[in-house]
Amino acid sequence: MVATVLSVALVPLLAAATGGPDDVGYKIKPADSNLWSQRFRGGRLIGGGGCPRRCISFTFDDGPSWDTTPALLETLDSHGIHATFFVTGHRIDGDGEVARRNRAVLATEWRHGHLVGNHTYNHDLLDTMTEPTLRYELDRTETLIHGVIGERVWLFRAPFGALHHPRAVRAVFSREYTPVFWALDSEDWRVHTPEAVLANVRAELDRAPRGGVLLMHDTLPWSIAAFPLILDEIAARNAAFIARGEEPYEVVGLERFYEPLRAAPVRRRRR
Ligand SMILES: [Zn+2]
């Protein structure tokens, strides 16, 4: 059911190259990704590669950011695409106006059917943290996200993609998070223009043509501006693939990469 809906997301992508999303008349069903969210509990590490067929899954880290994220949400909505947002706790904490606005953006992400994950509170290196700090970074963020969307999230992304120290690894898995890494890196934090982000993503798609999980940051204005260009690039590549009789990229959610940590118990047939 979920897979069917997400696979339809390809259609608006192709339409974007020709007539624009309005011509498709396709609207997302907000509830689908939200329902999937509860099934990420306690999964294997998602490395982000290994699409059996060409696929791309969009992930945006470090937000929510009231001044940059909303434009991205509009682009995602207009193309009928679901993404995953890895949220930092410090942005949605407190009584200040900025935190209040950021919480409203997070609520919108969730309401529009995007997946949400924990990206720690302060965005520091997990591998050097003590037990109490790890607890604060993970649990405080979890509580804050829960306060906005009304449920616990099970997806986790380590700041800088660094998760090596046994204490940090244990902290993540003991809370039954599914850690998510990436196969394609936009390196959008290294550059300052949309064109440069697009060039990075092009190079990544050339390097890893089957695609995978793409890392971007919804706190960077040039990355938000690059996103429609990236969709155009994917649509153009898809048009070329289809013309050659090859499979196009399918835009998928992280559920495509999910595997339970423990194998499901084998059901014995009663005699
Ligand atoms: Zn980050």
Image (cartoon, rainbow, N blue to C red):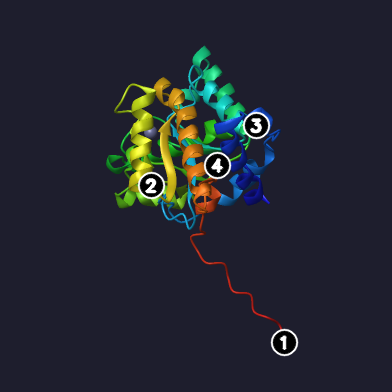
Give coordinates of residue 44: x percent, y percent: 46, 56
Disc 4 Cβ-to-ligand 1 distance below 8 Å: no
> Secondary structure beneath disc 3?
helix
Q: Nearer the viewer, mark 3 or mark 1?
A: 3
Mark 4 Cα shell of 10 Å, populated few (<14), some (14-19), many (≥20) = many
The amino acid at mark 4 is: Val
Disc nearer the start of the sequence (2/4)? 4
In three-dimensional space, the C-alpha distance between marks 3 and 1, rounded to whole angstroms, equals 47 Å
**Separation of marks 4 and 3 at Cα, in angstroms:** 14 Å
| Residue that numbered label 3 is attached to | 111
* Residue at x 69% of width, y 34% of height: 27
For label 4, the residue is 153
Question: First in sequence: mark 2 or mark 1?
Answer: 2
Q: Which residue is mark 2?
A: 183
Which sits in the foreground, 49 or 101? Answer: 49
Q: Are marks 4 and 3 in contact (CB under 8 Å)?
A: no
Q: Are marks 1 and 4 in contact (CB under 8 Å)?
A: no
On screen, residue 66 above or below 252 = above
Q: Position of residue 247 (x, y in %)?
A: 52, 52
Q: Is residue 70 left or right of residue 113?
A: left
Left or right of 251 on screen, residue 128: left
Distance between the alpha carbons at the discs numbered 3 and 2: 27 Å
**Image point (43%, 56%), residue name:** 50
The circle on residue 248 is: none
**Amino acid on which the number 1 mark rests in the picture:** Arg
Q: Quadrant of the C terminus?
A: bottom right
Q: Which secondary structure lies at badge 1?
A: loop
Q: Which residue is mark 1?
A: 271
Between tags 3 and 2, which lies in front?
2
Position above or below: 179 against 116: below
Q: Amino acid at mark 3?
A: Arg
